[in-house]
Image: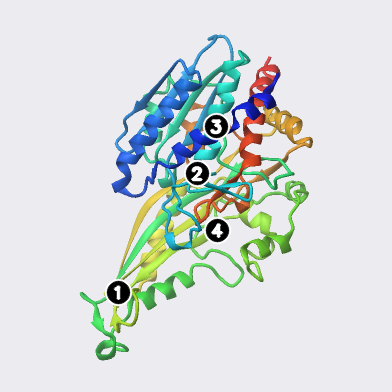
Amino acid sequence: MEKLKEYIEENKQRFLDELFDYIRIPSISSIVDHEPDMYKAAEYVKAALLKAGADKAEVYETPGNPVVYGEKIIDAQLPTVMVYAHMDVMPVDPIELWDSSPFEPVIRDGKIFARGADDDKGQSFMHIKAFEYMVVTNQLPCNVKFMIEGEEEVGSPNLPQFCKDYKEMLTADVILVSDTGLIAQDIPSITTGLRGLSYWEVEVTGPNRDLHSGLFGGAVANPVNVLAKMVAQMVDENGKISIPGFYNDVIDVDKTERAEMAKAPFDEEAYKKAIDVEELAGEKGYSPSEHTGIRPSFDICGIWGGYTGEGAKTVLPSKAFAKISTRLVPNQDNQKISKQFKEHFESMAPKSVKVKVKPLHGGQAYVCPTDTPAYLAADKAYTETFGKKPVPVRSGGSIPIISDFEQILGIKSVLMGFGLESDAIHSPNENFPLFNFFKGIETIPLFYKYFVELGK
């Protein structure tokens, strides 16, 4: 691509100013009070696409948050790339752990600090600016479509139906996604697999009201104690998940592929130091990279009950709650796992309490083949901008809608992420290095170039 670096350098401050305006919109999809912000974000994305050169862009209603669709069709005979991204972000709690306001982006140490800086406003904005460059310089080699949704962080509950309703509009040759990361800033990588997900909220109820812990403690079961004991039994001493039938559909990765995965650089000591732990955990017989790449996991994402305010209040609580997730591997069905967990967890409960399990959301795992024109184009693009060949990796994360795209639209996705593990997505002080943001804008146009060339 001619003069790509020069264009980025000339416009970098404008790119950042526009991104920061986008980030300032608190588009938290899981909190209903932020519904107006979801529409504000959608209108911002629509305007950004039109400004970048899209022929048309519209905000589409769903039963939940909106979806923005935009396109530029230069020749119906040419290939079509569809960019998928999301404009919603995670809640910011605990707010006291942020070093700066989460929705007022600041640059420190060469990084943008804000909620959504990486996931996914920063990464999605790279695509809009890369598209702008190709349009402005008349170097767009194929048709481009954008589908940017507002519910990814809550499992994309309405996007599958949107895809069914607008299947013809959404036809494309490949879906391009930047919602993943790199092994390191100097080691490019392409995500070839994503884990699936099942997520629940559980409620444990004991007495019909909070009780005095002195007058009733020892005679009445404490729901918090019971819940803690129940969740502690969900993973055994070898790191295996204890849900009956959980591993029935797991396909073990063969030794050859495990050996290839092991070639990816991994510094265990640096990994532990970065998150300030002395020892790692996980299923016996697998490495840390394999724990997050090819094996399922079970985690308590939140647990609460009783009095948690300042000072003491001696109560035996009436209720206890937890939010629980499992990450799943290819061939595990999230709905089947959800049913197995519900039946198992409710059956574990002693008669002293009542248990309810409420499924919240989930999705299937996804594997990307490494011999397609799209993958090979991504490989060549990274190689050119980073000066070294990218490493294929399987991510521990989940993007549930990716498998739905394949099932509903019949389109494979290629995952070209530019984030880093240190970006603290979903956590306080989320950040995105300026280097990665601009390197993404530099790399993405090359994907288009090589995708068209390799597809001929």
The Cα–Cα distance between marks 4 and 3, rounded to whole angstroms, is 38 Å
Rendered location of residue 227, percent (x, y)? 39, 72
Q: Earlier in the sequence, mark 1 or mark 3?
A: 3
Which residue is the site of mark 1?
Answer: 353
Identity of the amino acid at label 1?
Val
Label 2: how many Cα within 10 Å (few below 14, some 14–19, many 20+) = many
Rendered location of residue 376, percent (x, y)? 71, 28
- Front tag of 4 and 3: 3
Tell me which corner region of the image, top left, top right, bottom left or bottom right, holds residue 341: bottom left
The Cα–Cα distance between marks 4 and 1, rounded to whole angstroms, is 27 Å
Identity of the amino acid at label 3?
Phe
Identity of the amino acid at label 4?
Ser
The Cα–Cα distance between marks 1 and 3, rounded to whole angstroms, is 55 Å
Which residue is the site of mark 3?
Answer: 15
Q: Earlier in the sequence, mark 4 or mark 3?
A: 3
The Cα–Cα distance between marks 2 and 4, rounded to whole angstroms, is 14 Å
Which residue is the site of mark 2?
Answer: 364
Tell me which corner region of the image, top left, top right, bottom left or bottom right, holds residue 266: bottom right
